[in-house]
Image (cartoon, rainbow, N blue to C red):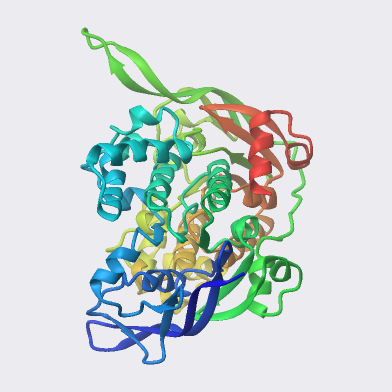
Amino acid sequence: MSEILDIKNLSISFKKKNGDVFQAVKNISFTLNSGEILGIVGESGSGKSVTALSILGLLSDSRALYSTESSIKFKGQEILNAPYNELREIRGGKIGFIFQEPMSSLNPLHKIGKQISETIMIHQGVSYKIAMQKTLKLLIMVGIKNARQRLNAFPHELSGGQRQRVMIAMAIANHPDILIADEPTTALDVTIQKQIIELLIKLKKQLNMSIIFISHDLQVIKKIADRVCVMKDGKIVETESVDAIFNRPQNNYTKTLIESHNLLNVNNKESNTNILKINNLKVWYPLKKNFWGKCVKYVKAVNDISLELKAGQTLGIVGESGSGKSTLGQSIVGLNKYSGNIFINNQDIREISSQQRDFVQIVFQDPYNSLNPRMNIEEIVREGLDIHHSELSMLEKHKEVIEVLNEVGLKETDLNKYPHEFSGGQRQRIAIARALILKPKLLILDEPTSALDVTIQAQVLKLLQKIQQERHLTYIFISHDMNAIRIMSDKIAVMKDGKIIELGTREEIFNKPQQEYTQNLIAAAL
């Protein structure tokens, strides 16, 4: 194999507003061979995206500083600090780029046909008509259904997977030699993720491209890469073939990343007591009304669900985006209007005042959005006590806040800090502490680890297992991550289109799934 990209001694620093300099990438070197898929893996802040952006000169000239030894050569030609005209020819022409979040990268005001055809006209110098013909072929190539009609669609009219396919079509429009894919599957469901990976492998062979695939998830890297660079704190700590990385890792950090996917299950003892019983639950949202104002069409987010949950167990609820799993969880804590019945400890939750519902709490997916940025950590965690236990003195509340923060691995010195001063994993610990302060019997965990790096995910899952054992809690664990579901759940409910299509023990679901949809979810996660 011949080298198509050669990066040597790359160091990148950024000027802060206060004049300080932060070094994001620290003297890294690697090569990309023709026809190769190179995986770059690392957690948030490791420098992997900064490295990718530097290849095309997409970092801010006023803030980014390169060391004098830094070198980026494409086909033997130095392109670091190359003139604008040279970089313009390379960007989108010889090197394509797929960004992490397509909704942020696509122009919401322009139809996708126009957006893709624009790069073709710029780099190939063809007419609009010919560019649109080429665009149609590209949409068909990347697997967009009804491609001709989709030419006139706006980004918001497409699903997440379709938008990512559009980004891929745009990136390969000019048959680039290299395709850089920066976290292209992070925001996607596991089955869509599998489709995008398979598509990229197919296009690599079809167009004879080399690919740099960036991800924080080693399991995704394992499915697509030939060779892997592991990054931590701006440095490459290990570079090897994908086989060597997974079977013979040398660096301790690499070993930690791999072990984070191999947490042990905890088997909770089944109680004879039902803590939760749901009968014929429906959550329908009006979608269309007729002339007289009567609703004639609904979004059936949750459609006639019945289930029971024993005390002390964990029920995993898994399904793709839009399956209704979060709506179900929110309904149990009374956040949605519904028909049917929800009983907790044999009490209908409609008959219990909101102040008396402290026995069921919820932890949301994104702690940054669920924590009030204007309140310090003591105020956030104490808020439940202020509402539900006003009889307690401030000193008593203060002691309970300290106890629960210690339980989730935080310190008393964190009390006066604000959410923005913490990492994602720490913020999720704060959200867990806020829920635990009321000593609930049932805790609903709605995608509690999906926004976290893999090692932080492992820490939070271990913490949740420990708390469950110590407090004898019952969990409803909602996720689209089959690995997290396997680790946490005693029983699993698989949801699709607002219904539970399969319900069984962890062993039954993973070893003998009955539904094709469940089989596909498991196959995509392996």
In terms of depth relative to the viewer, which is nearer, 91 or 216?
91
Q: Position of residue 192 (x, y in %)?
A: 53, 42
Q: Is residue 188 left or right of residue 85?
A: right
Q: Residue at x 57, y 66 (%)?
A: 38
Q: Name the residue: 33% across, 36% down.
A: 133
Q: In the rendered image, is residue 274 in sight? A: no
Q: Is residue 201 above or below residue 351?
A: below
Q: Residue furthest bottom?
A: 68
Q: Position of residue 427 (x, y in %)?
A: 44, 64
Establish if 82 lies above or below 198: below
Q: 85 or 366: which is nearer to us?
A: 85
Q: Nearer the viewer, residue 457 or 112?
A: 112
The quarter holding residue 266 reads bottom right
In the rendered view, tell whether residue 33 sits above or below residue 150: below
Quadrant of the rendering where the N terminus is positioned = bottom right
The answer to whether any part of residue 128 appears in the image is: yes
Residue farthest to the top? 292
Residue 139 x/y as whole percent = 41, 38
Of 371 and 211, nearer the camera is: 211
Name the side, left or right, on which 422 lies relative to 226. Answer: left
Residue 512: image location, x then y, percent: 78, 35
Number of dots carrying numbers: 0
